Amino acid sequence: MPYFDKTSGKYRATKMINGKRKNKMFKSKSEAKRWEAQQTEGSWSAVQPNLVSVSLLEWSVEYLEYSKQRHTPKTYLEEKVPAFNRLFEAIPNTTPVTDLTVTACLKILTLRAQDVSGNAANKDRKNLAAAWTWGTKYLGMPRDNPFVAVDRFPSDQQARYMPPESDFWKVYEVARPKDQVFLLTLLHTGARRSELLRLTWDDINLDTGMIRLWTRKRANGSLEFDWLWLTSRLHDALQKHYEQRISEHVFCRSDGTPYKWRQHLMKILCKRAGVKHFTFHGIRHLLASKMAQKGVDIPNIRDILRHTNSMTTTRYIHRLGITKNVLEDVFGQPES
């Protein structure tokens, strides 16, 4: 049954036959109903060279609906949606996808690189290319991906700021008790912000001393979990936090509703503590640094950070500048 799509201002017709789905947008509900009734297995298998291409807007609406369900809110709101918004600033959203050329994509991404950075252009290229690949599979869009055809832009490696441990504890001291538990959990587990914001008490077993962290940082976007041991200090902090719980969510507002972002917390706390601003992810870097400096091997660091392979962990440690100084071993000892 067709339904009105508020984003496009049109009626979306949907038909599924033998596991394949087709969608089409119409100005009126009657047109959408008529189109659905005309779709048959025979008509789909027949050669139809004059099919009307979906527009850029229709493609974006379909893909973003998928992305909202499959990706994290941060990825959806901070990467996927803005990438399409910038695309529509350069090209009318009524343009058929078949009219989007490699040249046009190159111009759009080049402007992004000039206005912001090569990294920013590459991020838009990645997100729009992924959306096109999805459209190829589910909307029958052309297989030639114009965004993939554009070469990656030169980009400077971004410095990863990792706070001194003393700065972390200064921030910890000025935080509210419940935020102290949040910060300590970040440091003692290496969890990502999104993993703690979705944490419920079902994910913490105080009897066995384990915590379950769920993540979407996988290729297919599905939620997966890993169990980690709690340190004794974190166990005690969570035990006290549990005794004062007001919600099934471990970290929540005073009314029991879960936090969604907490994007301003670190700016406020760092300013209050008088230290250079660092992020939640900077705390994850700090844990990686402490483990490497203590001589923890790569497989164990990988397991705690929950990377899917050791190469990711190796690159992670290397970029933080905490690999062993082998040159000191070569030249640091005076000759006898």
Image (cartoon, rainbow, N blue to C red):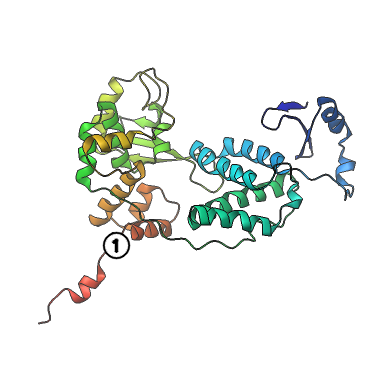
**Residue 167 percent location from the top left of the image:** 22, 43
Q: Nearer the viewer, residue 260 or 189?
A: 260
Q: Residue at x 88, y 48 (%)?
A: 50
Residue 50 appears in the rendering: yes
- The image shows residue 267 at horizontal and vertical percentages of 32, 37
Residue 72 versus residue 303: which sits nearer the camera? 72
Residue marked by disc 1 = 323
Q: Is residue 7 left or right of residue 292?
A: right
Residue 8, percent from left and from top: 70, 33
Give the secondary structure at mark 1. Answer: loop
**Left or right for 104, reference 213:** right
Give left or right: position of 160 versus 58: left
The quarter of the displayed image where residue 93 is located: top right
Amino acid under disc 1: Thr
Classify mark 1: residues with Cα within 10 Å, few (<14), some (14-19) or many (20+). some
Name which quarter of the figure residue 253 lies in. Answer: top left
Q: Is residue 309 left or right of residue 15?
A: left
Q: Going 81% across and 27% down the picture, which residue do you hit? A: 28
Considering depth in this image, is 323 or 225 the residue closer to the camera?
A: 323
In which quadrant is the N terminus drawn?
top right
Residue at 85% from the left image edge and 43% from the top image edge? 44
Q: In which quadrant of the rendered view does residue 245 lie?
A: top left
Position of the C terminus, as image quadrant, is bottom left
Looking at the image, residue 183 lies above or below residue 319? above
Residue 243, percent across and down?
28, 20
